[in-house]
Amino acid sequence: MGLAGSLCLPVQPVRLPLAAVCSGEQRPRAIFPSLLLLMSWVTEEGGEAGASLGPCSAKGDEQQKASSSPHPGRRVQFLLPPVTIQRPPPQEEEKAFYQHVGHLLGATKGGFERLFAVDGWEDLLEKCVRKQLVRGSPREGRRPQPGQEVTVKLLGILEDGSLVEKDPQLTFVLGQGDVPQALELGVLSMQPGDVALILTRPAYAYGHVGRDPDIPQEAPLLYEVTLLRVQDSPDPALLPAPERLSLGHRKRERGNFHFEREEYQPALHAYQLALRILPSPVTRGLRGEEEEEEALRQLRVKCLNNCAATQLKLRLLEEALDSCNEATRLDPDNAEALYWKGKLLAELGEDQAATEMLKRALRLEPATKAVHAELSRMARRQRGQLELGKDPPPGDLLGR
């Protein structure tokens, strides 16, 4: 085996204080074991000889003797002293950002918390989201409106200076919940060409959950936002099927993000936006068009199932049942839709209909534990022994 295939080098990142970054010193670096190998071997008699690559264990000595190596019986010893490999230097816009942040924090000597109280910032939301204009647009322009599509250049840091957001061209539609609320509020107050700092408390960023692996729980954030472009968002009905499919997937993923964080209202909003992008398929045309429509139909069914699960969490039982009915209309043999419909019917006290739905789901997916669990729960309830259990998450319930 070659050297590259035989060594596993762990990475141990080392974080520098923000002050060191802002003062122009080196950015955080990573420490690696050296790739400079100090090698020597010992002959069977114990004498040293010239260099050769080979096994580096006692067991390897025996293997070496029986091998076709030109140096049988000799052992290689690898000494790996640590060395420092510096990361690429920061780009100019990052340097300017860090220098500005260093100036702000140096003046306040209290971290982000003091910035929520000092003068020189515009309050966008009761000292929870604040804005400071770094550089205004050279020309007058109109502020973006909800429903318009904007493109921004984005940098974002934690209080310790860790860079956790960087996107040279982030595009989203205002009011659709695709980005943290603080960013939407900040962009709504800007003109094209403006550069601004947006300071936000955790509740308007990533909240009590954070974002694995880089944003911890209850973390305030400081963004630098450059508003590059504002335009009317495209009409989804006029988009080609592949673009609608891609956009629908992104909205659904955003809904799943919120659902996993138990943010059910934003999750439902995202799923419903996806459904508006994915109208019920009605066209029948060429084979290629039929394949695209089938992909749209399948994604619509998934979004309807997601809606049902979220509406159940919000105790919107009738609305959830409507979502299930639409899903089973599009795909009568969709086991997940049958599961949610059975669960909802049970919640509404229609046990016989619920049992029929769940048994249909079980025939389609006999190994699904969630269906077995719900049937058992219904049986216990009918015996007066109801036990409360936790619902499974929406989407991919049946391993899809």
Image (tube, grey):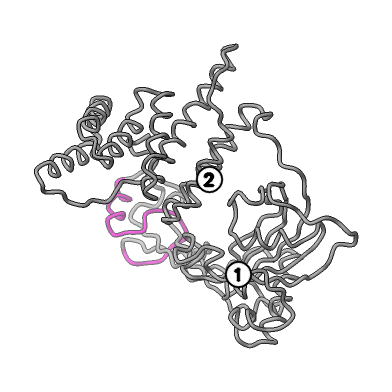
The kind of residue on which mark 1 rests is: Thr
**Please, which residue is most extreme toward the right here?**
139
Nearer to the camera, 299 or 5 = 299
User: What amino acid is labelled 2 in the image?
Assistant: Ala
Whether residue 103 is in magenta: the answer is: no
Magenta region: which residues?
45-66
Occupied quadrant, residue 60: bottom left
Q: CA distance from mark 2 to mark 1?
A: 23 Å
Task: Work out which residue is located at the far left of the displayed protein and give it.
Answer: 383
Q: Quadrant of residue 382?
A: top left
Residue 156 placement: quadrant:
bottom right
Viewer-proximal residue, 24 or 204? Answer: 204
Q: Is residue 209 left or right of residue 112?
A: left
Q: Residue at x 24, y 35 (%)?
A: 350
Q: Position of residue 220 (x, y in %)?
A: 56, 71
Which numbered disc covers residue 270?
Answer: 2
Any magenta on residue 55? yes
Q: Position of residue 211 (x, y in %)?
A: 49, 60
Near mark 2 (Cα within 10 A), the count class, few <14, some 14-19 or many ≥20, is many
- On the picture, is 384 further left or further right than 171? left
Q: Is residue 306 left or right of residue 272?
A: left
Residue at 21 percent across and 52 percent down: it is: 388
In this rendering, position of residue 63 left or right of residue 249: left
Q: Residue at x 20, y 41 (%)?
A: 373
